[in-house]
Amino acid sequence: FVSRIFLKPIIKFDQEKCTKCLICEKKCPVQAIRIEAVQKCNQKKCIKCLCCIETCPNGAVYLEEHWLYKLLKNTVKAIFKCPNSTCL
């Protein structure tokens, strides 16, 4: 459960770069993206195929590590004194 939800990166949108062209919404094979007043990605439906990122002409769609994953990664680095992310 924890790894399935908290350790996967999530799709995010840069509100300033997005022109609401709907390309990412149309290209999503599982219809996880909805462009309305605010861009949304249903993270439960999303299969992380990255079609939205690859097709966005403005670079408004990106992946972000979940905050819990960042916390775990930093904790493991501190405990084991890892110089990079090879510990996870």
Image (tube, rainbow, N blue to C red):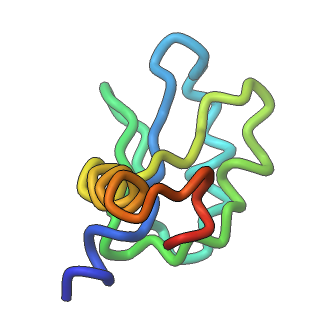
Please state if 10 lies on the left or on the right of 22 as rendered. Answer: left
Question: For this rendering, which residue is in front, 83 or 43?
Answer: 83
**Rendered view: 49 above or below 62:** below
- Return the residue nearer the eye: 68 or 30: 68
Residue drawn at x 36%, y 50% is 74
Classify residue 46 by image quadrant: bottom left
Residue at 74% x, 24% y is 58
Q: Is residue 42 left or right of residue 27?
A: left
Q: Position of residue 20 (x, y in %)?
A: 55, 27
Q: Nearer the viewer, residue 2 or 46?
A: 2
Between residue 61 and residue 30, name the one nearer to us. Answer: 61
- Please identify the quadrant where the N terminus is shown: bottom left
Residue at the spot x=39%, y=58% of the render?
A: 73
| Residue 73 against residue 8 in the figure, above or below | above
Q: Residue at x 31, y 83 (%)?
A: 4
Q: With 74 as the anchor, is 21 left or right in this view?
A: right
Residue 63 on image: x %, y %: 55, 48
